[in-house]
Image (spheres, rainbow, N blue to C red):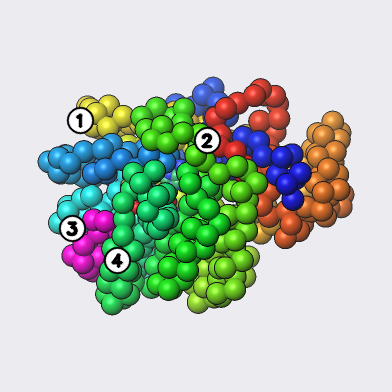
Amino acid sequence: MNTLIDKYNVPGPRYTSYPTVPFWQSDGFGENAWLSSLTDTFRSTNTATGISLYIHLPYCESLCTFCGCNKRITKNHQVEKPYIQAVLKEWEMYLKYFSEKPQITEIHLGGGTPSFFAPEMLDLLINGIVKQTSISTDYEFSFEGHPNNTSYQHLKTLYDLGFKRVSFGVQDYDPIVQKAIHRIQPFENVKQVTEWSREIGYESISHDLVFGLPFQQISSIQDTISKTIELQPDRLAFYSYAHVPWIKGNGQRGFRDEDLPSAALKRQLYETGRTLFEENGYAEIGMDHFALPNDSMYKAMQNGTLNRNFMGYTTTQTKVLLGLGVSSISDSWTAFSQNVKDIDEYQTMIENDQLPILKGHILTDEDLTIRQQILDIMCQFATSWKDDEFSFEERQVLFEKLAGFKQDGLLTYDENSLQVNPAGRPFIRNICMAFDKRMLQENTERKLFSQTV
Ligand SMILES: C[S@@+](CC[C@H](N)C(=O)[O-])C[C@H]1O[C@@H](n2cnc3c(N)ncnc32)[C@H](O)[C@@H]1O
Ligand code: SF4
């Protein structure tokens, strides 16, 4: 296993999109091109599947020194209302372009920390969003809560607004790890918010854990996992720590590189977690996730309907994902668009009646084909292709890579399809990279991604 880790532990994307953000091409992209793609897909899919909304709520009270999210640290809660108003205005701007009332299938509040905002602010936000829409019968509203500041009232208010799913950032319970990542968070806090959620009626409670954090040991992760299992969350995200210290403002230098587990130990941490989860009735879903058999994500995996987008794995099948708020990414299936990443710039653009778009990409037919193949690998651990989807040279390159993976026991393949073996699952990002034509074409050493293992 260690040789495989040495061989495959290279920088690589997590494939929440194809092409991945660093490979977006600005040629042909602009506000008009984005709106045309968005409104076309909206028109053809709104009645059948509805749309998804991702709303980025960027504030946190305290900086965790491992965090790779777009956030701003402040204790000043006066920022809440102007930010919510800006998001609502952005939504109003989009509503003008839609040919009919949007049907909302999914809302996800991410961050930053949604529970930084007072319950009445979240109420203002959601009521402002849904008032000019219809809601799908099988809608899914979810949010990310910080166990240190999610109150009973947050949970109750959001539940009454239709939220039935919540995920709590747990990360790790070991005091040494917590100190290193500057996130002191007692077990009692997580227990309390988990019990409140259950009492109120949330249908799916998820905990986020991270492996590969500074000072993590096999014994400490075993303890974290046994505490987690005690609380019986329906879902678990078990993220590989993405060490991306070059992202400005991350403050990831709260510990030294030498304090991080080696690649081999990091893999053992993951294997330890996976074994314990599986022994306790959780099934592995795609990459990074586990779920109990009663959870809809498990059912989606079983019946082949699991999906993946910028929010990660999802059970919904929408083709339009509109991202509102600073740094949010939108997806119309044939185009991507990202908002500006600075809060002040975001708010100024909205005040000036401008859509706060930073950059984007219009997908070519070839991008769309590869996008589907990568999605299939990430969600079903298998994919297929037609003869005419690759040129002779591309087939040569692909088959050479597949032969290498096969030799290492990671997958099986024939002329037109591949199937990832259980041994290949830890290397799923590497397998997707064999299909990533834009990355292969650039052939440059890019320190833009975290390590794949
Ligand atoms: C926006 S936070 C969740 C809500 C809230 N801010 C909190 O921390 O509880 C999203 C999740 O991303 C994960 N995350 C953040 N930075 C990460 C990194 N560098 N590598 C891997 N996972 C990370 C953490 O598990 C975190 O809970
Ligand atoms: S992990 Fe969560 S609370 Fe900590 S800085 Fe990142 S977004 Fe904020």
Badge 3 vs badge 2, beta-carbon distance below 8 Å: no
396 w.r.t. 173: above or below? above
Closer to viewer: mark 1 or mark 4: 4
- Kind of residue sitting beneath label 4: Glu
The image quadrant where one finds ligand 2 is: top left
> Relative to 398, is 287 on the left or the right?
left
Q: Which secondary structure, mark 2?
A: helix
Image quarter for residue 393? top right
Q: Nearer the viewer, residue 370 or 275?
A: 275
Closer to viewer: mark 4 or mark 3: 4
Closer to viewer: mark 2 or mark 4: 2
Q: Earlier in the sequence, mark 4 or mark 3?
A: 3
Q: Which residue is mark 1?
A: 351
Determine which of the numbered discs, if any, sits on residue 258 in the image.
Answer: 2
Q: Earlier in the sequence, mark 2 or mark 1?
A: 2
Spatial separation of the CA atoms under disc 3 and disc 2? 41 Å
What span is colored magenta in the figure?
A: 147-162
Image quarter for residue 192? bottom left
* Residue 200 at x, y percent in the picture: 27, 75
Closer to viewer: mark 2 or mark 1: 2
